[in-house]
Image: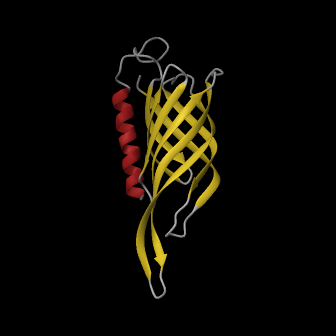
Amino acid sequence: MKRQLVRVIACMAVISAALAQFPTNVAGQTSAAPQTLGIGFQSAFPAYGASVIYNAPSGASVQGILGAFADLKMYAGRVRYRFQPNGNVHPYAFGTLGLWSYDGYRAGTYSVEKTTESVFGVGGGAGIEYFFAGMPSLGFNAEIGFGSAKFKDIDYNFSAIGVGVGLHYYIR
């Protein structure tokens, strides 16, 4: 798991260095529509992984999260509604629908066997995305929400209030 995390961080560093080569205007944004497409990392309890966000001009956003770095894997899509920003702070509400897969153990009468189970899960919540002064293409988000996935064969169910954080670099 540590190797995978190091790989993700290294990839993000390489991507950030490459994206820094794009021409910017006076406000620090690329010449395309500002803050339209972001790539980065998102933790969403109890999973975490690579993330892509597309912000539509209407105020709606879609986000895909590929959380394949632990025993609990998450392949999720989100719809986010962005409220009116207040300076560098951009509040939003979100809904999540995804597939959770867990590698675990099932206890039988005389044995314990390794198994994998996948189930659909849902969630929702609210958060803020903060854009640092001097780095308007870099967004840090923090959120709180509720998530639920019910596994049948593996003794690992969750319906919990959780917190999440993310870091995204907007390329246009």
Q: Is residue 145 above or below residue 2?
A: above
Q: Position of residue 80 (x, y in %)?
A: 55, 33
Q: Residue at x 47, y 17 (%)?
A: 28
Q: Is residue 5 above or below residue 41?
A: below
Q: Position of residue 145 (x, y in %)?
A: 63, 45
Q: Residue at x 57, y 40 (%)?
A: 95
**Residue 55 located left or right of residue 3:** right
Q: Residue at x 41, y 22 (%)?
A: 172
Q: Quadrant of the N terminus?
A: bottom left
Q: Position of residue 133 (x, y in %)?
A: 57, 23
- Residue closest to the far top: 26
- What colouring does the structure picture have? secondary structure
Q: Is residue 110 above or below residue 94?
A: below
**Residue 39 located left or right of residue 122:** left
Question: Depth check: 152 or 43 in front?
Answer: 152
Q: Is residue 123 above or below residue 127?
A: below
Q: Position of residue 129 (x, y in %)?
A: 58, 31
Quarter of the view holding residue 126 = top right
Question: Depth check: 155 or 8 in front?
Answer: 155
Q: Residue at x 34, y 37 (%)?
A: 14
Question: Depth check: 155 or 65 in front?
Answer: 155
Looking at the rendered structure, the number of numbered marks drawn on it comes to 0
- Residue closest to the far bottom: 110
